[in-house]
């Protein structure tokens, strides 16, 4: 039986989606059964103003809409969120906050978790976003498997808390090889660790 990896993301303008899709490919290459799931896009007025051409109306037409069962099902969960004021996007947080019943039954504990994010600026709060996400994981009783500097490639992308990408002034900088490598590494790492924990 394979490790079950859920990749749960919110993305207004596609960057975090591209990161999630890469992580999904890497998870499958590492032998996991992968569920790629999107938090239905509900762009706020601010998102529409910031990115009028890209932010779309509600609807999850890129990946199936996430449900609580996707998290309960998984042995490992990767959460992806754009950075919002140095924090997790409200849309993803609303989904996480909907998991109270599952949390209450202990169904979110003992899984492997990690995260990835994107921001427009280099010092715009990527690390604080990931650390804020991980506050929740402590409450789950989850096992945070951060990448650290466990591979030489982590000295290139430079984020030991997860994976992150800077979208730049026009919010359209594509993922570079360091980010792609770091996503591959993170997905492999969570799958391998979850495999050791579950015996799968
Ligand atoms: C309301 C709002 C808050 C944002 N806050 C930050 C921020 O704190 N730091 C930053 O660098 N970029 C910030 N951004 C830019 C987004 O983080 C950036 O566009 C993100 O990488 C887009 O991801 P996506 O393409 O997956 O939606 C913000 C954008 C919006 C709309």
Image: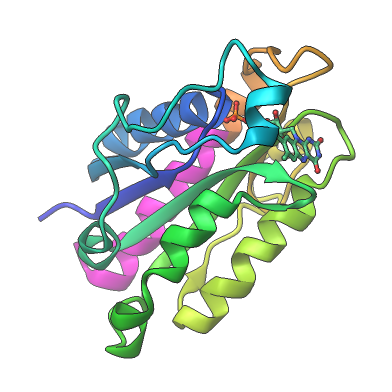
| Quarter occupied by residue 61 | top left
In magenta stretch: residue 194: yes
- Residue placed at 47% from the left, 29% from the top? 17
Position of the C terminus, as image quadrant, is: bottom left
Whether residue 141 is situated above or below residue 4 in the rendered picture? below
Identify the magenta region.
Answer: 183-200
Q: Is residue 57 visible?
A: yes
- Residue placed at 56% from the left, 79% from the top? 138
Left or right, 39 with respect to 158, comes to: left
Left or right, 75 with respect to 162, comes to: left
Q: Nearer the viewer, residue 45 or 87?
A: 45
| Quarter occupied by residue 146 | bottom right
In magenta stretch: residue 181: no
- Residue placed at 53% from the left, 59% from the top? 93
Position of the N terminus, as image quadrant, is: bottom left
Task: Give ligand 1's quarter of the image.
Answer: top right
User: Which x, y percent locates residue 142?
Assistant: 46, 75
Q: Nearer the viewer, residue 143 or 169?
A: 169
């Amino acid at each position: 039986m394979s490790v079950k990896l859920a990749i749960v993301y919110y993305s207004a303008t596609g960057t975090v989606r591209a990161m999630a899709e890469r992580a999904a490919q890497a998870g499958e290459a590492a032998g996991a059964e992968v569920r790629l799931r999107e938090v239905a896009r509900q762009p706020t007025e601010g998102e529409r103003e910031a990115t009028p051409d890209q932010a779309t109306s509600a609807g999850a037409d890129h990946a199936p809409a996430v449900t609580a069962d996707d998290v309960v099902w998984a042995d490992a969960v990767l959460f992806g969120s754009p950075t919002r004021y140095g924090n997790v996007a409200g849309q993803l947080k609303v989904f996480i906050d909907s998991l109270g019943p599952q949390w209450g039954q202990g169904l979110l504990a003992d899984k492997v978790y990690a995260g990835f994010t994107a921001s427009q600026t280099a010092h715009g709060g990527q690390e604080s976003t990931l650390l804020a996400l991980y506050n929740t994981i402590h409450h789950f009783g989850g096992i945070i498997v951060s990448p650290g500097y466990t591979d030489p490639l982590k000295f290139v992308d430079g984020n030991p808390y997860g994976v992150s990408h800077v979208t730049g002034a026009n919010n359209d900088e594509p993922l570079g090889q360091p980010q792609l490598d770091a996503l591959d590494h993170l997905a492999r790492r969570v799958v391998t660790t979850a495999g050791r924990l579950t015996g799968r």
